[in-house]
Amino acid sequence: MLGRYVVLVTADPLARALPGQFYMLAAAERWGGGEGERPFLARAVSVMRAHDDGVVEFLLEDVGPGTKRLCELQAGEDLTLVGPLGNGFSASGPDTLLVGGGIGIAPLLAVQDAWGGLALLGFRDAEHAAGAQSFAGAAVATDDGSVGHHGLVTDLLDRELERAPGPIRACGPPALLDAVRDRAGAHGVSAELALEAPMACGFGACYGCVVATVDGYKRVCVDGPVFEAAVLV
Amino acid sequence: MIEFCGIELRHRVINASGCFDALAAGRVFGDRLFEEFPFAAYVSKTITLHARDGNPPPRLWESAAGMINSIGLPNRGLDAYLEHDIPALARLPVPLVTNVMGSTAEEVGELVAPLAERPEVAAIELNVSCPNVATGLDLGADPRGLEALLAHVRPLTAKPLIVKLTPNTADVAACAASAEAGGADAVSLINTLRAAALAADGSGLWLGGGSGGLSGPAIRTIALAQVWRVAARVAIPVVGMGGVSCGRDARELIDAGAALVAIGTESFRDPAAGSRIARELEGSFTQIAR
């Protein structure tokens, strides 16, 4: 447990996920029969950490029937994984600004583990801000001011962009990603955004997870989930 | 080997149109997918005359034991399919069935005629769930409309024609009989059932396309009823589908009269569902033989 979050630790001996990639996760038993007889579909979850020995860590928050069941998994219960899936972040350096909001901090930890970077993380409150503890140093903002800066994580980003602009990697709620995209454009820095979308399959079959880009609709699962901010409309 | 409309198939399990993108899956899972292809035939997603972007998101809604989709048949159009997709799909180790949809009989004819010339295409499936502009009904919801469609399209190809019936009709067996009378070689059913979800904030319909199609185990017993009725009415083979997630479900559709079983939504949950269900289905026959 990390405050409001649950860290799910499992293993995939077959492949090592790159930062920004995800898996489709479902509990092998009791997947269904929850609220409204759900969940039915697997849930797309970003990799938070992928270790050399095949151990994979995911960050979860109980926000619905699927994540609730995943959060309840006990050691020894079987988990169905399909992955690693999607295109991750491109390699970056220690001057990179990692901007995350809420559960969206997970793939940014994978980036920081791999290539370093300055983490700027925003949360609702102290219970959620506990998620920042896994990072090797992070500046935190909270909506209620209970931890770190009282305000938005974009305030921290503005400060950094004035001080030492660098490329941005971001993941979080849509409003945060919109704000990051505006800042990146204004400061002339590149930004890669990891998007979230409900998915039925995760491997390009269902076309359910599309996002509008300058080249028309693209599938978040196989064309993303990481997109250059400039291609999103 | 199984014989279906003159085509030899390794087993009785194929994919439902639009539920498995072999080219995308090949990029994700690598060449192994082509070597151990999960289905006995590959049915393409629906191809239309002109390119379609598909519906605005959101396109998915998870329901009790199923999902509603409102994808809107995105595809690059017939010309791109003929030029780019067919050569790539010809690499698959199984016969290729091409699914097409047009809003009029003439438009369907324009799709079928060039496909009839392509040796890579083993059979053509007609998606007749397109709304008829004149009546507002799906083209395939009306037996007379189906008759007119087949009268126009049947002479255009010697390849097997499979009519993918819509379940959103008063009398699916009458529609199947019309398809058979018009010269269809097989019928496939059921397509998704029209369904809707409401936005939690009271702003109206949730899906970007308005209503959508319900699929998954939630519709399996409806599929069983419709397959049973259709198989009792027509002599041509029936491809049964709707909510199949295991060999036992597939076996029930076979017992209801289906010659083949198609897997749709379960492939989203398990990309290897086709081979698993084919194996389980084969096992169900072996057990009875003992």
Image (cartoon, coloured by chain):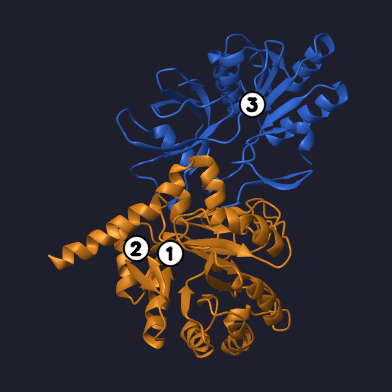
Q: Amino acid at mark 1?
A: Ala
Disc 3: which residue = A89
Q: For numbered disc 2, what is the local secondary structure?
A: loop
Q: Colour of chain B?
A: orange
Q: Chain of mark 3?
A: A
Q: Is label 3 in contact with label 1 (beta carbons under 8 Å)?
A: no
Disc with the residue nearer the chain's start (2 vs 1): 2
Q: As drawn, is A27 to the left or to the right of B105? A: left
Q: Is residue B8 left or right of residue B149?
A: left
Marks 3, 2: nearer the viewer: 2
Quarter of the image holding residue B213?
A: bottom right
Whether label 2 touches label 1, CB < 8 Å: no
User: Which one is in front in this view, the residue at disc 2 or the one at disc 1?
Assistant: 2
Q: Residue B11 has which mark?
A: 2
Q: Are marks 3 and 1 on the same chain?
A: no
Q: Is residue B290 visible?
A: yes
Where residue B242 is drawn, which disc sits there?
A: none
From the top left corner, tell me how far across and down residue A73 is, in percent: 37, 33
Pointer 1: what residue?
B262
The amino acid type of the residue labelled 2 equals His
Residue A138 in picture, x, y percent from top left: 63, 12
Chain letter, blue:
A
Q: Position of residue B119 (x, y in %)?
A: 55, 67
Question: Gap in Å between the C-alphas at discs 3 and 1?
Answer: 37 Å
Chain letter for mark 1 = B
Up-down relation of residue A144 to residue A42 (above or below):
above
SS type, badge 1: strand
Badge 2 local density, few (<14 within 10 Å), some, or many (20+)?
A: some
Question: Where B69 falls versus B226 (above or below)?
Answer: above
Q: Position of residue B276 (x, y in %)?
A: 34, 52
